[in-house]
Amino acid sequence: MADTKTRRPSAGAEGRGPAGKLDGFSKEQLHTFLREMLLYRRFEESAEEAYAIGKIGGFCHLHIGQEAVALGFVGPLRKDDYALTAYRDHTQALAKGVDAGAVMAELYGRVGGAVGGKGGSMHIFGADVGFMGGHGIVGGQIPLATGIGWAIRYRGGDQVCVCFMGDAAVNQGAFWESLNMAAIWKLPVIFVVENNQYGMGTAFDRVSALPVVERAGGTGVHAHAVDGQDILATWRLTEQLVSDVRNGAGPQYVDARTYRFKGHSMSDPVSGTYRSKEEVETKKREADPITILRDRLFDADLLTQEEIEKIDGEVREVVDEAARFADESPLPSPEDLYSHAYAEINEHGRLFLDGRER
Amino acid sequence: MANLTYREALNQALAEEMERDESVFLMGEEVAEYDGAYKVSKGLLDRFGDRRVVDTPISELGFAGLGVGAAMVGLRPVIEFMTFNFSFLALDQVINAAAKMYYMSGGQISVPMVFRGPTGAALQLSAQHSQACATWYVHAPGVKVVTPATPADAKGLLKAAIRDQDPVAVMEGELLYNVKGEVPDPEDGDFIVPLGLADVKREGEHVSIITHGPTVHIALMAANKLEKDGIHAEVVDLRSIRPLDVDTILASVRKTNRAVVLEEGWPFAGVGSQIVSIIQDEAFDHLDAPVVRVSQADVPMPYAKNLEQLAKPSADRVIAACNRVLYRS
Amino acid sequence: MATKVHMEALSPTMEEGQLVKWLKSEGDTVENGELLAEIETDKATMELVARGAGVLRKILLGEGSTAAVGEVIAVIGEEDEDISALLPATSGKKSEAADKADAAEGSGSKKEDDSDEEPDSEEAADSDEDDASPKKDAAAKKTAEKAEGGSESSDASADDARSASSAASPDGRVKASPLARRLAADEGLELASIQGSGPGGRIVKRDVEKAAQEAPAAAAPGAPSLAPRLSVPDSADDVRDVPLTQMRKTIAKRLVESIGPVPHFFLTIDVDMSRAVAARGRVNALLEGTGVKVSYNDIVLKSTAAALRRHPECNAHWGGDHIRQFNRVHLGVAVAIEDGLITPIIRDAHLKGLAEIATEVRELAGRAREKKLKPEEYTGATFSVSNLGMFGIEEFTAVINPPEAGILAVGALEERAVVVKGEVQVQPRMKITMSCDHRVIDGALGAGFLRTLKAILEEPLTALV
């Protein structure tokens, strides 16, 4: 849980710029970063609680610790740009503009959910705001992003598509096939590896001879590495890459180095055989993206204790409201079982062969 | 009416749809400069350019998924598999992405696209290049599957598939590309064969042979031979496996009281299993004999010519099956 | 030395007897010549006496059950004598429950009880075909077992099974294709009576079609089937199942042998329809403007229903081993259609008024001609009426529609000169002939019913009384 009260030793004043700014970001912008990341954090904490009391079922992968990646790579996008990711998808959906109540209600499996209770935690969609989904198969979303990039180029648009994936996804064939095609056709796709160092319980260096940043090698896609816990860094890099891609630079690849503070999913341990408790505690202490930003703002005199508490209170209200909305949203009706299986029910023949149409 | 080959009919369908709708594009291995491994896309690159007729790397999973992604934002990709045998590399994108996208996005994102290419055995291509793939695709709710047997059906169904809002697998017969048949002229209007409409390719009252795809021709051969014996077999060409024209199947069985279900694929959980299930469920009281299935032998396709012959469904096996359900021995 | 007690021939024509009552229990001492049991024969209830002395060791035939003449029905022996050799081979291993079941089955168990010493019982079994079907099943079973059990299970033995007279499998199930079952039901054919030509003797469509063709073309009214086919009663209270007495069984069998499957006899009455004609005029005047018009046939139907209520013994079905009498009257009305005839049913005709019957008959007849009747609309009649009066037929006889026991053939209403109290008068007259199934309705019963019917038609007010 992000601590908004205990001040960490100063991180130094190296980033401090002109009065009222930090690394060229305005105080207002910086407060927005803080507010957004706190929203993601509180949202996931609320989901965690709801999961614990059975309001959320199935697989539920929390993004706690990785907020600066979600915000940094989605925040700078336009509404008509696209983002999609794997199954750890709640906060990217929030970042792209899906309503917090709709995301929470989806986790609750309610009709008010982002996809009406059909998808759950792993399948949040918000097509109207360019959030093209949470996808459940490791690497499965990478060809889809490539296709979205293809469509953008086909139509001559200037949008970009940001495709998130976990570090483990780079070992899938879909990854290499997609980067190769994106490169030969110069597709406007930014492939972002949320490198939290573990594919579930397997450390990345045990399954890859090369570090994440080098894995795009051989495809011709430009590779970048960034401190994924530093929102200012991820935001700044994204702004640059989006601009380049809009100008025809072709696909980009980012190794965003981050860390997951929770287990792989709600049903997995935070630490244990694959990583030590000490490692996790140290990271939480030293690499919490929210704490890092807060302290830098404190150091730069761009944030007061009262302000952060006020922000935190406000986002808690948003999250509480989302949880209330989810709680009050009805379960899908039995008729919804068959809705949306096909976009077009053909005039002839039977599409469903379980006797439903008789 | 023009007398076209199955290949030409498909080519015509692609050209017409690309002409009609700017969002339609063709992508696959060897489809552009090489004119298609089976020449289905012959001349399309010259006509529509490399933006819309696109050669891919040999990355079935990648370009199938690319098609799904493009469809998710409104294009109408036609993804050609050099053969559907290779599409197994892409099944994650077909089953987990294309089939389920509309459902798991709660109806937000449809996938209007076509996967097409040849399926089934040709001649002595042995195990990995000789399988009927319809079962794999039709198993997943969300996908539609059509299996044209004639040039006219090939054209009409491919055009309907391209216009459909859902992913449709158009499974062509590898041995059918040179088959000729009458196809309505484009000047006579848009020729569409709607999905989900079976076609009684031959009427008869003694036994129904229900089949789809290349084996329609085997069924017709069998029916011709049976005719000499005084047996009038009805040949029901499903044309579309999903949606499935259950009404036509049942009407035929109710008329003849006997059914032989023929398919090119393997028997276990094959398309025929579903047909038989429907018949026993909905036409039980009309059956005078248990339904008999004819399929490929339940082994991988062998290479040796004689073994391959044994493995494939043949007119003789269909005749034997008909005799069985007719209680003629 | 132990003595077997046989079912004895207690009348010259007796082939089997029903055990009414044992007068001794197992364990009782029995003197030679002492009364053992009461047996109902085809003529009367007779006494069976002991032909040996000792203790009644074993009773093999339960009360109410039937055994063929010659069959062992009990054993008399010394108190501690081993009588197992005299008992049916299998009974020693059987539980008491099984014994009871056998006893309840009656003659059905006879096959097993036969011993080599009793060759004539085999003949007895073969000769009475009219009896309960379990016996036939047992025979079929034996044939089938023979075919299947033989170590030379060649095609020949399989063919044996196929050519066995029915498709009954060893478990008694008749094998038939679903279509054949449906067609047989539509034709009113019993599957068990059809020879199957499919694999394993399966009855298939062509077998049913063949059987339907071979069945007598039922040209006369009614009769889709000659086989007893009892409808399921609406409720147990609506029917009374009368067990067949030996006498009734013999009558049934003899009459079938002499006349045909349904032993018909005919009774004709000549009815003065003066009051019925007047009543019809008044009724139709009342119905003016309703679009309903009552015919003479409707009056006959209504009257028949009323009469049947008073003679339930005529409102009955022949059930093979029992007669079923109905309280409710479901009247079949024969309707000529393009290529034959069909008998739609006025259900609960006894509860319906004339206008209702008239309306229903028109409606059913209309749909019958369009061949749009549902099966339940033409099956399950308890009694039928056929009317050829409109064709000018003065009188005729109708063929009974089994399992019904009677049908009325209604002739034309015409004015005829009759002598009344020594004077010649002209009256509207109608002749009605009743065909009776003699197995169910004897002459006096039929006459009684017709007398009631005549009374109602000659004074319609009678129906109100």
Image (cartoon, helix red, strand yellow):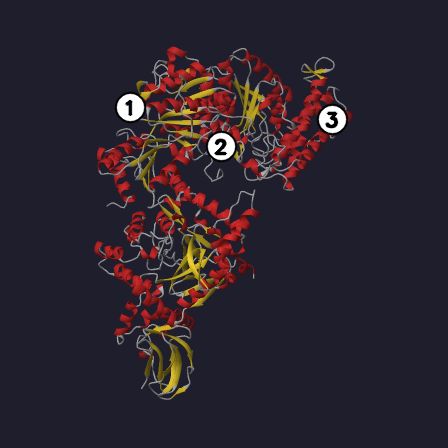
Q: Tag on residue A311?
A: 3
Q: Chain of mark 1?
A: B
Decide which of C422, C11 is in the foreground and name it.
C422
Q: Give the residue at the far front of this rendering.
A: C423
Q: How crowded is the residue under tag 1: few (<14 C-alpha within 10 Å), some, or many (20+)?
A: some
Decide which of A10, C250 is in the foreground and name it.
C250
Residues at marks 2 and 1, CA–CA distance in whole angstroms = 55 Å
Q: Is residue B30 at all visible to an observer of this figure?
A: no
Count of numbered circles on the image: 3
Q: Which residue is mark 2?
A: A206
Decide which of B293, B306 is in the foreground and name it.
B293
Q: Chain of mark 3?
A: A
The secondary structure type at the circle numbered 3 is helix
Residues at marks 1 and 3, CA–CA distance in whole angstroms = 72 Å
Residue A124 lies, in percent from the top left, at 58, 30
A323 sits to left or right of B131: right
N-terminal of the two: label 3 or label 2? 2
Decide which of A327, C275 is in the foreground and name it.
C275
